[in-house]
Amino acid sequence: MSGFLHYFTSHFSTLRLEFWNLLVGGFANGFIYAMVAIGYTLVYGVLRLINFAHSEIFMTGGFAAYFVMKVFVPTTSTPSGMNSVLLIALGVVVGGVVGAVMATVVERVAYRPLRRRNAPKLAYLISAIGASYFIYNMAGKEFGRYNTAMPQPYINHPVFTIFGAPVEMYYIIIFVVGVLMLVILDRLVATTKLGRSIRAVAQDAETASLMGVNIDRTIAVTFILGGIMGGAAGFLFALNFGVANTMGFTPALKAFTAAVLGGIGNLRGAVLGGILLGLVESFSVAFLPGEYVDVTAFAVLVLVLLIRPTGILGERLGRSA
Amino acid sequence: MKVEPENCVKGVKHTVEEDEPMKLRLNKTVAAVASSALLLMAVPAVGLASTSGATTKPTYVIGYQGPLSGGNQQLGLNMVFAVQLAINQANATHKLPYNLKLVQYDDQGSPTLAPAQAQAAVANKKLIALVGPAFSGATRASEVYYRPAHIATVSPSATAAALATGINKNNFMRVVAGDDVQGAADANYLVKTKGKTKLYVINDASFYGSGLASVVAASAKTDGASVTTNTDPETSSCGGTASASQYTAQATQVVSSGATALFYGGYYCDFGLLLGALSSAGYTGTIMSGDGSWSTSLVAGTTPPTAANNVYLSEAGGGNSNLTGKLAVQYKALSHFSANNATYAAQSYDATNIILKALSKVYKKGISVAKLRSGLVTQLHKTTYKGVTGTISFQSNGDLSAKSIVDFGQIQSGTITSVGHS
C-alpha cells in the first residue's frame, strides 16, 4: 500500500505538468466514445435494447472510408490544405453513409423479424451478438484478419498550444467533426418533426402510434442516425489506428459503458458519458499502469451507478416499442 | 478424405487428416476443390513410388506451431515456409529411409489458443518433433503438453528468458538468444550508443513483452538512465481485449514525460498502433522495439506509415539472419515473398535442419514414434549443426551454447536497414 501511495504522490507532481496534455488526449478519445455511444442510446431509447452489433457498424464505417482513402489519397505525397479538408469530409460522409447502411441491414435482418413476432428481449440480444460475430468474421474473411494502415489524407503537426500543451492536427479533426455532428444531431432530435417522433416513440411507443407516428419508420431512422455517427466515428478512429476486422469490439464496449454512465436513452448523457470516460482513461494513465485503464473506466461506472442508478443524466424508465 | 483449411498458407501443402481434431474453419467449396486436386496429384505420386519400390517408407510429421492467422501472422508465415523448404529439400534427396511431412498448428500466437494446438500436436501419432512454438507466452502454455510427451520443440523465436530457466535436458530448445541477452543489448544501444538518459519503457503485458521490457528497464537503470515504465495490454485490433484508444492517453503521457527515448516490448501489430498515436501526439524522441516488432508488416500496419520511420529494432539472431543466395530464391518460390527481412525464416530453417540431423542419428528401422520423440530430445542435446545463422548446439537448459549477437535495424523509408550489432 505504501508503494502505491509513493507511486501516487510521485506521479502527482508530474500530473500537474501533464494536465493539459492529458486533457487534450482525453477529449479526443471522449468524442469518439460519445459518437459511438449516441448509437447505443438512440436505439435503446426507441427499442429498449442494446444493439450489440453497433461495434460492427463502427468497423464497417472505418473500412468503407479506408477503401475510399486508398483510391483518393495519392501514394506519392500526403495531401495538405483544402485537399485534406475535402478528403476528411469525404471520409466522414462515406463512413457515415456506409455505417447507416449497415445499421439498416442489421435492423432489417436481426431485429425487425423478431419485433414482428413479438419476441422476448433476450432473443434480440442473441440475434445482435449473432449479427456482430457474422459481420466481423465476414470482414476478416474478405479483408484479412490483421491491422492495416489508413492512407493519410492530412499531415499531422502541432497547430497551437494550450498552456504549453501542443494540440495536434489529428485532435483538431476529431474536435471539429465530433462537435459539428453532435450539435447537428442534438438539434435534429430536439427541434424537427423527425426528432419529435423519435422522442415520442421513446416515451411511449403505443401512444405515439395512436397519435399517428409511424413506428417502423421511426425505428429505421433511429438506426440510420446511430449508424451515421458510429460509421463516422469509425473513420476518425481509423485515421489514427488503421482498420482491422476486430477494431470495433473494445471501443464499442467502452462507448456502451459511456452511454450507461451518462444515462442510457439520454442523448446529451451519452455525450457527457463519452467525454467523461475519455478523460478518466486519459488521466488514469498518469496515475496507474496502463493495464488499469479499463479497470478505472469500469470502476467509475460502478461508482456512478451506485450513486445514480440511472446514470448521470438518466431519467425514469418509460415504455417503448 | 483430405481437406484443406480455408485460411491455409498459399503454396504450402497443408493437409489435415480426418482423425485429427478440426482446428480451422472449413470452406466447403475450397475443401471440395482441394480434395479433388489432391486426388489428381496422388495418381502420379503413387506411380513414382511403385517404380522406385519404396512403398514401405514410413511417414513422419514435423509440426510447426505459431501464428498463421490473426494480427501477428506475418511472423508465423515467415517461419512456416522456411520449415517447409527444409523438409522439401530433405525429401528431395530421396535418400532418407522415411518421408517427412509438415503439419501446421495455428495458435495465432495466443497463450489461450495454444494449448488446444499443442494437444492436437501431441495426439498426432506421426508427429516426432516440432519447430516452434513461435511466441513465448504460447510456448509457456504449450510446454505443459509437450514436456510430458517427450516431444522436442525447437523454437526459432520464443525468446522469453524464463522458458530456459532451471530446467535440465530441456525438451524446449531455441536457436535464438533469450531476452536477457537481447534486452541488455537494447538498453546498452539506447543509453550508451545513442546517449539517451531518460527512457520510457512500455510493454504489452504479454509474457514475452513484459519480460523483454523489464530486462531493458533494469539494464538501462544499471547503465545510468532514468526509466519510467508502463503497461498497455494488447488491443482488440490485434487480437487482445484492450481498446486502441489507450494509446492516445499513453502517447500524450510519453510526450509530457520528456523521455528522450522509448522502448516497446511487444509485437508489431500493437506497436504500430502505438507509433500512430505517438506521431499524433507529436513525439519526436528515439523509438526502439525488439524482435517481436522486427517485421516489414510493422510499416503496413502503422497509420501513417511514415510514423514508423527511424524506429530502431533489435533481433537476437546472430550473424547472418537472412536466407541468402539459392536458399532465398527457393524460399521466395514457396512463399511468394522476399526472404529479405523475413524475420525468423533463417532460424526456422536451421531449427528444422538440426531436428532432421538428429533424426538421422536416432532413426532405426521399425522404431516406434514414442522412442523417436524421446530419442530426439536426447540426441538434440548432443547435436552440433552448422546452419545459416551460425553453429548451433544447445545447453542443457535449451539455450544456445554460442554467445549470441544481437542485430540492430532501423526502418528507413519503409524497409528495415541494418545499423550494426552488439
Image: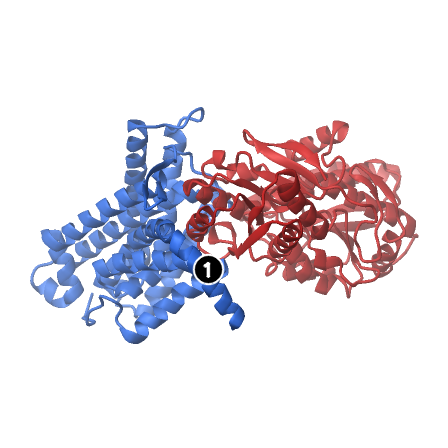
Chain colours: A blue, B red
Quadrant location, the C terminus of chain B? top right
Which one is nearer the viewer's eye here, B115 or B272? Answer: B272
Q: Measured from the top left, where is residue A19 in percent x and y?
A: 37, 54
Q: Where is residue B163 in the image (x, y as percent from the top left)?
A: 72, 58
Q: Nearer the viewer, residue A6 or A201?
A: A6
Return the chain for callout 1: A
Pick the residue in front: B37 or A146: A146
Residue drawn where x is 49% and y is 40% of the image = B302
Q: Is residue A36 in sight in this rendering? A: yes
Q: In which quarter of the image is residue B162?
A: bottom right
Residue identifier under label 1: A11
Type of amino acid under label 1: His
Q: Which residue occupies 83% across, 51% down?
A: B394
Can residue B1 be seen in this snapshot?
Answer: no
Q: In this view, does A139 lie to the left or right of B143?
A: left
Q: How crowded is mark 1: few (under 14 residues within 10 Å), some or many (20 or more)?
A: some
Instruction: Indicate the quadrant where residue A278 lies.
Output: bottom left
* x, y percent for residue A188: 15, 50
| A15 or B277, nearer to the observer | A15
Callout 1: SS: helix
Query: Is A137 left, or right, of A188 in this rendering?
Result: right
Q: Where is residue B169 in the image (x, y as percent from the top left)?
A: 84, 60
